[in-house]
Amino acid sequence: MNPRRPSPTAGLPAQWLTVSPERTVLGVIHNVTSATRLLDLLSAFEGDLRVQTYFTCTDSSPFSGGIAEFCAERELPFIPWAEAEARSFDLAISTSRGGDLHKLSCPVIGSPHGAGYNKRLSREPGAGSREPGAGSREPGAGSREPGAFGLTAEWLVHDGELIPSAIVLSHEEQRERLRDGCPEAVPFSHVVGDPCMDQLHASAPFRDAYREALGVRAGQRLVLLTSTWGGRSLLGGGPAVVRRALAESPREEYRFIAAVHPNVWYGHGGWQLRSWLEPCVRAGLLLPPPATDAWKAAICAADAFVGDHGSLTLYAAAFGVPGLLAAFDTRSVAAGSPMERLGAALPRVSASRSLREQLAEAVERRTGDTGAGAVAGLVTSYPGEALARFRRLCYTTLGLSEPEEPVFPRPVELPAGRRPAHGSPVGEPLLVDTEVSGADGSRVTVRRYPAALQNGSGSHVRDAHLVAEEGEPDARWAGVADVFLARRGVPERLFARYPGCAVVAVPLAGESCAVHLRDGRVFTATWARASWWAGPGVAASAVYAWLSRERTGESRGGAADLLVDSGGAGVSLLVMRRAGEPAADLLGPDAAEPGVVPER
């Protein structure tokens, strides 16, 4: 081992320091994905002034974007890789196998950066120790058929010597696969459990708080869309599944959040990913940045998921969230791994059936689903103990006694600074499906869908009309809108500009709005109580549906007490016709045919 020791902190002589640590630890970053797991593990040293931690980057990953920003934002004491090679540390911790880890002159603990060891990857011929995956997506790329990444001699041995001093495993089953891939490494393996799974379970009691932080309203279902990276991932096949999920789901009943692998963000650029998904974001998709724990909060808050072969899918299923697979790359999944078993247990998304129906079936299937339950048992062998066991391993390697304070998983922080559904001052056009029921036609069900994402099939809507807001920039929507939501109380200008418009709704004080008809008649609609979804838009659609069925308000004196349901418990809407208006056909002879959606 190199006898030289580093100065107590990067670039500072000892006399300038406030704390004189006894041991130095090097955290090895490969990309942002590995960095987030690394920080999870390094919480084992919290509160111990005897240990100083530095960070370095192997410069071996094709996905190096975001690392500098990640380190700067968290104020990590960072040193270049060349300097890390030249110095001596007491311990290095790496959450990947890429890079020249064999050049470090200290014990190295190797840990996975996902839900165990589930992918099979091979080094490229002549690539040395570069990050796997840049050109090895197919089995057999490299010198031989790859085993599980991180459990074979290909990744653990250099010039006949084992690179890591300790190999961290999350489950006993991984030790058997390690025995197949690198038998000489088995004596150096340590099964400690999974810190992320532990944190998810510690966060379970706070499900409601996470849902509130993510903007999930009462009565809404939160669906998590998970995508790993690569051409056979959920996003690798294009955003069709994401668009379809939003297009088919009433916005008052569903909320969607997409957890996208950091390698997608940094491989293509955050701006590009947001640009590709912007139509979905405008329709309400939550797209949290990659270097946060928002994905953990989303798993705790989710009612269902749609995923692929990435670790987030395995974590969600193991946590008990019901779900479907929209993509699954069997060629990159390690044989015998929990991920391979999950791929066999979960149903695939069908393009010929309603996604809502398939999610509902997944929820029903969760009870008694022995396949997914068996996979959940393969994520960790020591539930709740991962940090404690990992700390014990680290302090034994460092030759220090463990701190007296216990270490345990803490709940995920509440997501902060989430991006609104869209920042535009004008709301998205909505295709609104209504159903009037009851003996007297007083119950109205309203379901609203993002119009821009509809593909024209309309299989999930029956009796739809189009609602747009005043100022809608796309003339194709504005020209065929049946209902307009006005910003000011002069509806005549909208009737004059848009001949197909039948109804204009104008917000009033309190929980009321005025519903103007093209023939001059005006109704006042007042909600009996406040509800997050009971606004002017839903009121206008409910009144439009009621009037379309009645075609006359005279039978009840131009008044109705409607029970409106839009994704939650029904709320009473009192509709009163203002006196003195003409008694012609309520919608007028020039009303547009409902549900006309322009070609996109």
Image (cartoon, rainbow, N blue to C red):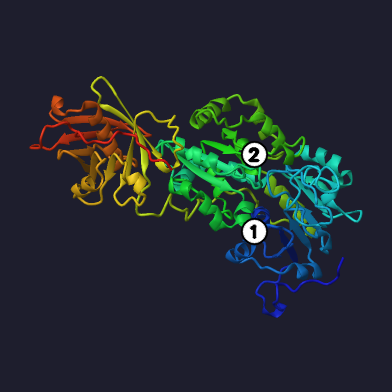
Frontmost residue, 550 versus 574: 550
Q: Quadrant of the C terminus?
A: top left
Q: Quadrant of residue 578?
A: top left
Residue 213 image point, x, y percent: 46, 48
Furthest residue in direction top, as rendered: 439
- Disc 2 packing (10 Å; few <14; some 14–19; many ≥20): many
- Disc 1 residue crowd, few under 14, some 14–19, many 20+, Cα 10 Å: few
> Tag on residue 314?
2
Q: Amino acid at mark 2?
A: Leu
Q: Quadrant of residue 118?
A: top right
Q: Which x, y percent locates residue 352?
A: 54, 28
Determine whether, in the image, residue 591 is placed left or right of residue 45.
Answer: left
Residue 378 in which image quadrant: top right
Q: Nearer the viewer, residue 101 or 49?
A: 101
Secondary structure, mark 2, is helix
Task: Please tell me whether mark 1 or mark 2 is closer to you in this view.
Answer: 2
Q: Nearer the viewer, residue 165 or 69?
A: 69
Mark 1 or mark 2: name the one nearer the start of the chain.
Answer: 1
Percent from the top left, x then y, of residue 273?
A: 55, 53
Which residue ends up furthest to the right in the rendered image?
Answer: 160
Q: Residue, x 64% and y 53% (percent of image)?
A: 263
Q: Which residue is mark 1?
A: 46
Q: Secondary structure at mark 1?
A: loop
